[in-house]
Image: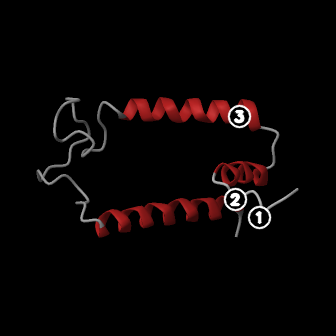
Amino acid sequence: MTIRSRTGLAAFATMIATLAILLAMGRPPICTCGTIALWEPSALSPRTSQMLADWYSQSHLVHGFLFYAFLWLVARRWPVERWSLCSSRSRGRSSRIRR
């Protein structure tokens, strides 16, 4: 199995696990209003975050690009293993893996 297919499989498994957790919590998979819209034009509507896109979607996209650019500048020469070490160290698990 290639790295690309493992990454895709991990992303798909994460989405399925998230869906299962949300359903177990009693959250509806779609808006309870009965409609699915591509865009919710009002930021103060009760349907905000229930449709495919809303006023916060652009913020999520911009923040994703900014975090990616920051990591690209700071950690582009680090091996992938070191990226995972940084995330585990922030959670206090650095005693497990030493280099």
Residue at position x 77%, y 61% in the image: 95
Residue at position x 19%, y 52% in the image: 31
Please rate how many residues cluster around mark 3, counting C-alpha atoms within 10 Å: few if below 14, some from 14 to 19, many from 20: few
Q: Who comes first in sequence, dot 3 or dot 1?
A: 3
**Image-quadrant location for residue 10:** bottom right
Please rate how many residues cluster around mark 2, counting C-alpha atoms within 10 Å: few if below 14, some from 14 to 19, many from 20: few
Viewer-side residue, 79 vs 98: 98
Image quarter of the C terminus: bottom right
Q: Which of marks 3 and 2 is in front?
A: 2
Residue 6 % position (x, y)? 64, 64
- Distance between mark 3 and mark 2 Cα atoms: 24 Å
- Label 3 sits on a secondary structure element that is helix
- Label 1 sits on a secondary structure element that is loop
Viewer-side residue, 1 vs 97: 97
Q: Do the residues labelled 2 and 1 touch (CB within 8 Å)?
A: yes
- Distance between mark 3 and mark 1 Cα atoms: 26 Å
- Residue 2 as seen in the image, left or right of residue 64: right
- Residue 81 as seen in the image, left or right of residue 14: right
Q: Who comes first in sequence, dot 3 or dot 2?
A: 3
Q: What residue type is labelled 2?
A: Arg
Residue at position x 25%, y 44% in the image: 51
- Colour scheme of the picture: secondary structure
Viewer-side residue, 56 vs 25: 25
Residue 70 % position (x, y)? 66, 30
- Distance between mark 2 and mark 1 Cα atoms: 6 Å
Q: Write down the residue under mark 2.
A: 93
Residue at position x 23%, y 55% in the image: 30
Q: What residue type is labelled 3?
A: Trp
Q: Which mark is residue 72?
A: 3
Q: Write down the residue under mark 1.
A: 96
- Residue 17 as seen in the image, left or right of residue 98: left
Q: Which amino acid does label 1 sit on?
A: Arg
